[in-house]
């Protein structure tokens, strides 16, 4: 893709701009559903935004739109000055990293840790699988994994299918960040883990985000974590962003304040069972 710079990208610090994004599922049928309703969002370089919202608010749909899992019905997506609105998903994956809730996604279970990392490295345009891995590459992968502090660097020849869920999430996180992406999307990536492992994976996540100053979005059902992680929290409802809270305002807010703001905006109580459990 050509380097078509938008005026905005030249003059501001934006990494991601989503303009009037619309996505309608089952259009023209009785099941028609507006999943993204003229949504606007700008992320500055290095923003770490947490995303909360009721069930079906459109959080995963927003991630799918950014990744190119489907094309928008209308609107545009500008990434670091490039218009990626019509770019194919596999091309976007070179510059957008995504970690899913399900530890089974994101890694190939029959391949070793080293092979998985090499594959991700080659997808990001670097020599990896398909090329003979030299000693320098292997050392690079090993050291990168050692930085995560899980001891996985001593298991480079272990098949990923033999790892625990937390270990797999860490390998996926490394695969997404070995070549730093322009945007990192974390889709409830600790939700399927036990509390201690979830905490460790969050710590590793925060370290890697900080190390590369990654522009990051994290969907979470843990309100407390949402309010404490990163520098900004957005709340979605009915395919749109209804609250956008910066770091300063967040510090002064309690969880109850947040829930009251949600109720005031939507005239209903927060209806996310999983969220209330982790309040
Ligand atoms: N591929 C699809 N086909 C039809 N409807 C879809 C599709 N993907 C999402 N939807 C609908 O769009 C709406 C938004 O879904 P989405 O998964 O984005 O919500 P969410 O905020 O991530 O919810 P949750 O917190 O429950 O995961 C829902 O009503 C969902 O049923």
Image (tube, rainbow, N blue to C red):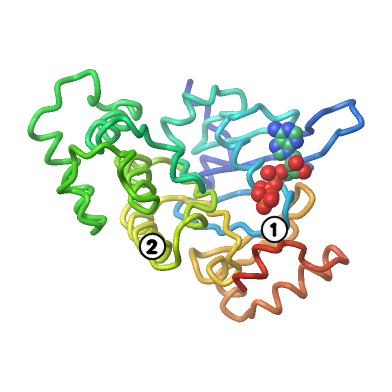
Q: Nearer the viewer, residue 254 or 99?
A: 99
Using residue 258 as the reference point, say whether residue 131 is left or right of it: left
Q: Position of residue 60 (x, y in %)?
A: 63, 44
Mark 1 CB within 8 Å of ligand 1: yes
**Dot label at residue 53:** 1
Q: Position of residue 180 (x, y in %)?
A: 35, 42
Query: Ligand 1 quadrant?
Result: top right
The residue carrying pointer 1 sits among few (fewer than 14), some (14 to 19) or many (20 or more) residues within 10 Å by Cα, namely many
Q: Position of residue 257 (x, y in %)?
A: 71, 78
Q: Nearer the viewer, residue 84 or 208?
A: 208
> At 79% from the left edge and 50% from the top edge, which residue is drawn?
238
Please tell me whether mark 2 sits on a helix, a strand or a loop.
helix
> At 64% from the left edge and 59% from the top edge, which residue is drawn?
52
Please tell me whether mark 1 sits on a helix, a strand or a loop.
strand
> How many callouts does the rendering have?
2
Q: Nearer the viewer, residue 98 or 276?
A: 276
Q: Residue furthest right?
A: 30
* Alpha carbon separation for disc pair 2 and 1: 24 Å
Q: Quadrant of the C terminus?
A: bottom right
Residue bearing mark 2: 197
């Amino acid at each position: 893709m050509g380097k078509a710079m938008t005026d905005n990208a030249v003059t501001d610090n934006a990494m991601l701009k989503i303009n009037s994004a619309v996505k309608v599922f089952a259009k023209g049928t009785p099941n028609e559903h507006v999943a993204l309703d003229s949504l606007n969002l700008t992320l500055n370089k290095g923003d770490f935004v947490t995303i909360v919202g009721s069930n079906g608010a459109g959080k995963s749909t927003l991630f799918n739109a950014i990744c190119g899992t489907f094309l928008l019905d209308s609107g545009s997506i500008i990434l670091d000055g490039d218009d990626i609105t019509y770019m194919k998903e596999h091309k976007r994956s070179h510059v957008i990293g995504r970690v899913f809730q399900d530890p089974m996604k994101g890694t190939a279970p029959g391949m070793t840790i080293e092979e998985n990392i090499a594959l991700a490295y080659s997808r990001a345009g670097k020599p990896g699988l398909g090329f003979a891995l030299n000693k320098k590459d292997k050392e690079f992968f090993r050291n990168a994994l050692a930085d995560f502090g899980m001891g996985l660097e001593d298991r480079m020849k272990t098949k990923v299918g033999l790892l625990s869920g937390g270990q797999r999430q860490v390998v996926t996180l490394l695969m997404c960040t070995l070549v730093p992406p322009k945007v990192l999307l974390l889709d409830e990536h600790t939700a399927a883990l036990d509390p201690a492992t979830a905490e460790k994976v969050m710590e590793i996540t925060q370290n890697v985000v900080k190390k590369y100053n990654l522009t990051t979005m994290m969907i979470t059902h843990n309100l407390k974590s949402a309010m404490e992680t990163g520098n900004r929290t957005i709340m979605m409802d009915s395919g749109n962003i209804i609250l956008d809270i910066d770091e300063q305002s967040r510090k002064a807010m309690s969880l109850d304040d947040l829930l009251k703001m949600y109720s005031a905006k939507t005239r209903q109580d927060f209806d996310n069972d999983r969220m209330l459990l982790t309040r």
